Image: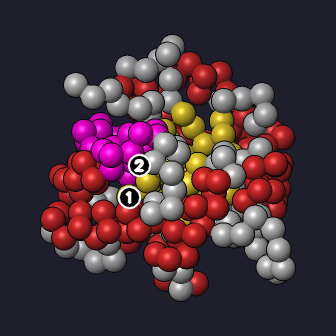
Amino acid sequence: MTTRPRPLVGVSLKMYFSLARTRSYLADLAGLGPVVADSGVDVFVVPDFLNVTTAVDLLRDTPVAVGAQDVSWEDYGALTGEVSPAALADAGVRFVEIGHAERRRMFAEDDIVTARKAAAVARNGLVPLVCIGENVAVDVEDAARSAIDQVLAALEDVPADAEVAIGYEPNWAIGQPEPAPPEHVVGVTTRLREALAHRSGTTRILYGGSAGPGLFTKVAEGVDGLFLGRFAHDVHNFRAVIDEIADHRGTRGT
């Protein structure tokens, strides 16, 4: 039996909060440090860029990692408005979210751009969190083909021994009242795991797209955790999901 990696759960704050609200949230999250440490679950938060260093400072003595919402494909240079992956590494960031459906839809980022960013993230010792997902509701086989094509393209120049996280987020389920059906999620992510079996580096698959309480137990066969959105903008809700994952995987104290 193949040993599954440690579970992973994270939340993106996107651009919902003011500076003060973000800092209040991060302080509350820091207060969950002992809970996270005991859970055996790896946890991260992805604030807006203005609060990345604030997040690192507030969470420094906790097991909660910090992520960034995007990145440049170049380490340094004349790229006005971009953010250097090397600078993110210096700042103490661990995860970098790339390829999100909003970046693809609103900013015309394609598989080539995502692949360049993933390579930049990996070469700077950070963990690419590659977001993938089909645009419209289709059957499991078609959705899996789309997901596999996207992730293999994104990881083309990422070393096989580099750690990566994959956020499977069916675009049609993002921001909706209900997540994708559990059988759909498990069907797609199981096939995705098989397609990534050649990788030697830690490879964790998360589900995102209206993820919330009670979902992990239904999709745990296919995923290693969840990538949460607005539901987890309440720290109490975030804790509930961490507890659920820890209880289901039996990781407390590990």
SS class, disc 2: strand
Give the number of marks.
2
Magenta residues, as a range? Answer: 196-225
Residue 9 horizontal/vertical position (percent): 50, 42
User: Mark 1: which secondary structure?
Assistant: strand
> Residue 72: horizontal and vertical position, in percent?
69, 70
Residue at the (25%, 48%) spot, across then down: 194
Rendered image quadrant of residue 113: bottom right
Please name the amino acid that badge 2 sits on: Leu
Give the amino acid at mark 1.
Answer: Tyr
Residue 60 shown left or right of residue 141 in the figure: right
Q: What residue would you read off at disc 2?
A: 206
Which of the two residues, 40 or 209, is positioned nearer the viewer here? 40
Q: Answer whether labels 1 and 2 touch (C-beta < 8 Å).
A: yes
Between 209 and 99, the one lying in front of the other is 99
* Residue 168: mark in rendering: 1
* Drawn side of residue 126 relative to residue 108, left or right: right
Q: Name the residue located 49 percent from the left edge and 16 percent from the top edge.
A: 254
- Confirm whether the magenta stretch covers residue 36: no
Instruction: Tell me what residue is drawn at x 22 percent, y 53 percent.
Output: 191
Q: Between marks 1 and 2, how big is the CA–CA gap?
A: 6 Å
Q: Position of residue 198 (x, y in %)?
A: 33, 46
Mark 1 neighbour density, 10 Å: few (under 14) some (14–19) many (20 or more): many
Specify whether residue 211 is in view: no
